Image (cartoon, coloured by chain):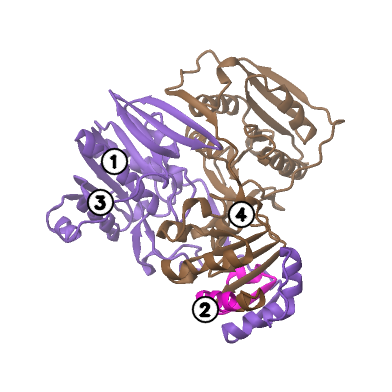
Chain colours: A brown, B purple
């Protein structure tokens, strides 16, 4: 039997981030991971739901693995409000002292988790891609480090709760189980909750944008290995020939070779093409986190680049020269 | 309008040299530049100063070489540079960094109206320093802001947060973190950096100047301990083609053209 660090039960909490439900499955993915951790620690999984008229999410989280759901349901919580949600999380965590708090790395989740970690005087590991309990019962967080080309295993020896944000898609969710039962704990708004200092004047869901890149069956992605802005433009001709969409890495977007809408990865678009052509991309995890491709063709001068390892076919060559060669070859084969 | 901007110097390369023994990055081995998101935040501040007047203080924490980003900001129109530099501050996680930066603001510009940061740095992308800093200084501090307007003694900002377009109003003092979406950084004027090196004012502060609680700064003030750092070494999944690009491309299409064509719904058969 383990395992009560400092005499506390090692409860695991998951922040219920239900906005954009259906597209945003990260809470369900965290619940599945939390179940695994709870099994290793012989403890329980609780979800937190703050909002107004949120019962459907409470049931959903129980069906996906929560043993308990703390619910604060109030009309003033109708919209996501960073400071208010931070205070609620702090309030509950101070009272119940969970061992671990997991938050999805959405825009809102990142901001709120960082504020809450400050208030709780603890650390926060960003964008974890792995969470495990080691043989000593310690919580080990794996997160990208130093620009995403390396992974670090991180331990928080003293600070509690141990907090982590987790990128959407890092873990698989459990199937919906209607038979699962869980405890629902309904709480009132704390009376000493300070008023929100950020006044929300307007909030509107953005119209469903044409998701061409996310839905494309062929994507041509380019990185800094293309060499220059001018050479990068050659990828557009390749896109035309392949009837594909253009994608880009963060450094390329920052250099102005491609626009922000073309960004593929953690902070950009999640793509799932039949075929991905990847030119001059090393494969930093911030980029590869956005890729779920059936077949990958990668071109890089460095055969050791992570992108080349991920590829079904890797071509060891200068990215721009291979791009030009492929354009010429395709023109012939497509009889242009 | 009294604005403070936090700048970060980041390495110009993505493949950083690192020491596999300690797991520490060898920052000194790479040339630095101003983080791109910081440039956009600086531009937003310069626009506010152009319109409403005021003063811009730029603060960075890093090794002595990080002074370069302050000089760049001075050349663009910032008024005072503050370099926070001390070996005792090295190895800080995001809460320790924010604590240190909060002391620097209190030391050099306690009467600030607005604090601005880039929404996340290109080398770590955590986006945490802004929100932590807002808590340290007990400020409202929306992240991912795309535009900032001054309305009386408040700001009105727009931001996109998880597919919602929000318009927010916040009384000053406040903090915002700025995205790379809408402010296009202006170019550094010709000769501006040289002039900023000879004329601009930069002050340097160490942990003692800041009266920092040494238990809250640097590596010793950070919650996390790195057990191990490793390069994700995937096994080679597929085949590698080597040689002249033309030959490689032809081999790709002759070996996989049918499969690629089928996935794409195109005939990529032999060239005629």
- Tell me if label 2 and label 4 are in contact, CB under 8 Å: no
> Which chain does tag 2 point to?
A
Secondary structure beneath disc 1? helix
Secondary structure beneath disc 3? helix
Does any portion of residue B32 appear in the rendered image?
A: yes
Q: Residue furthest left?
A: B199
- The residue wearing badge 2 is A321
Give the number of the disc on residue A332. none
- Tell me if label 1 and label 4 are in contact, CB under 8 Å: no
Alpha carbon distance from label 1 to label 2: 42 Å
Give the number of the disc on residue B45. 1
- The residue wearing badge 3 is B73
Residue B159 drawn above or below residue A140: above
- Nearer the camera: disc 3 or disc 4: 4
Does any portion of residue B210 appear in the rendered image?
A: no
> Which chain does tag 3 point to?
B
- The residue wearing badge 4 is A290
Q: Is residue A313 magenta?
A: yes
Q: Residue at x 68, y 81 (%)?
A: B271
First in sequence: mark 3 vs mark 1: 1
Residue A311 % position (x, y):
66, 69
> Which chain does tag 4 point to?
A
Magenta residues span A304-328
- Tell me if label 3 and label 1 are in contact, CB under 8 Å: no
Alpha carbon distance from label 3 to label 4: 34 Å
Q: Residue furthest front?
A: A336
Q: Residue furthest top?
A: A191
């Amino acid at each position: 039997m383990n395992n009560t660090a400092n005499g506390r039960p090692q409860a695991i909490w998951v922040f219920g981030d239900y906005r954009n439900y259906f597209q945003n499955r990260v809470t369900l993915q965290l619940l599945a991971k939390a179940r695994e951790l709870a099994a290793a620690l012989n403890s329980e999984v609780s979800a937190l739901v703050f909002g107004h008229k949120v019962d459907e999410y409470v049931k959903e989280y129980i069906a996906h693995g929560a043993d308990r759901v703390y619910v604060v349901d109030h009309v003033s919580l109708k919209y996501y409000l960073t400071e208010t949600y931070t205070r609620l999380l702090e309030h509950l965590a101070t009272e119940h002292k969970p061992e671990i708090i997991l938050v999805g790395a959405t825009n809102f989740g990142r901001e709120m988790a960082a504020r809450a970690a400050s208030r709780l005087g603890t650390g926060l590991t960003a964008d974890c891609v792995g969470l495990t309990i080691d043989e000593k019962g310690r919580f080990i967080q794996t997160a990208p480090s130093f620009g995403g080309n390396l992974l670090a295993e991180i331990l928080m020896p003293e600070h509690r709760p141990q907090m982590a944000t987790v990128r959407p898609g890092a873990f698989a969710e459990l199937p919906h189980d209607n038979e699962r039962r869980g405890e629902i704990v309904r709480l009132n708004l704390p009376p000493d909750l300070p008023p929100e200092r950020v006044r929300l004047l307007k909030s509107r869901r953005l119209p469903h944008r044409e998701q061409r890149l996310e839905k494309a069956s062929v994507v041509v992605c380019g990185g800094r290995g293309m060499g220059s802005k001018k050479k990068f433009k050659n990828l557009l001709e390749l896109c035309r020939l392949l009837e594909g969409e253009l994608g880009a890495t963060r450094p390329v977007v920052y250099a102005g070779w491609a626009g922000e809408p073309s960004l593929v990865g953690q902070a950009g678009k999640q793509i799932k093409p039949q075929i991905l052509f990847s030119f001059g991309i090393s494969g930093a995890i911030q980029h590869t986190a956005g890729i779920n491709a059936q077949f990958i063709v990668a071109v890089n001068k460095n055969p050791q680049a992570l992108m080349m390892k991920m590829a079904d076919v890797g071509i060891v060559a200068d990215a721009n020269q291979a791009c030009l060669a492929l354009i010429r070859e395709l023109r012939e084969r497509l009889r242009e | 309008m009294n604005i403070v901007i936090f700048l970060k110097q980041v390495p110009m390369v993505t493949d950083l040299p690192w020491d596999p023994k300690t797991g520490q990055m060898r920052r000194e081995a790479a040339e630095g530049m101003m983080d791109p998101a910081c440039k956009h935040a600086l531009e937003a501040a310069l626009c506010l100063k152009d319109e409403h007047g005021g003063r811009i203080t730029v603060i960075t924490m890093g090794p002595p070489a990080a002074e370069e980003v302050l000089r760049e900001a001075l050349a663009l129109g910032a008024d005072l540079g503050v370099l926070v530099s001390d070996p005792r501050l090295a190895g800080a996680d995001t809460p320790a960094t924010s604590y240190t930066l909060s002391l620097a603001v209190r030391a050099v510009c306690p009467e600030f109206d607005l604090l601005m940061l880039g929404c996340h740095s290109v080398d770590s992308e955590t986006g945490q320093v802004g929100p932590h800093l807002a808590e340290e200084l007990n400020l409202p501090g929306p992240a991912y802001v795309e535009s900032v307007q001054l309305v009386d003694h408040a700001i009105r900002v727009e931001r996109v947060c998880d597919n919602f377009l929000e318009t927010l109003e916040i009384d000053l003092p406040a903090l915002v973190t700025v995205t790379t979406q809408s402010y296009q950084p202006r170019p550094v004027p010709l000769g501006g950096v040289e002039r900023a090196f000879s004329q601009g004012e930069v002050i340097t502060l160490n942990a003692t100047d800041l009266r920092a609680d040494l238990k809250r700064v640097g590596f010793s003030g950070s919650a996390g301990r790195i057990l191990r750092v490793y390069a994700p070494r995937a096994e080679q999944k597929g085949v590698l083609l080597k040689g002249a690009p033309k030959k490689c491309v032809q081999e790709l299409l002759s070996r996989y053209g049918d499969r690629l064509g089928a996935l794409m719904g195109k005939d990529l058969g032999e060239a005629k």
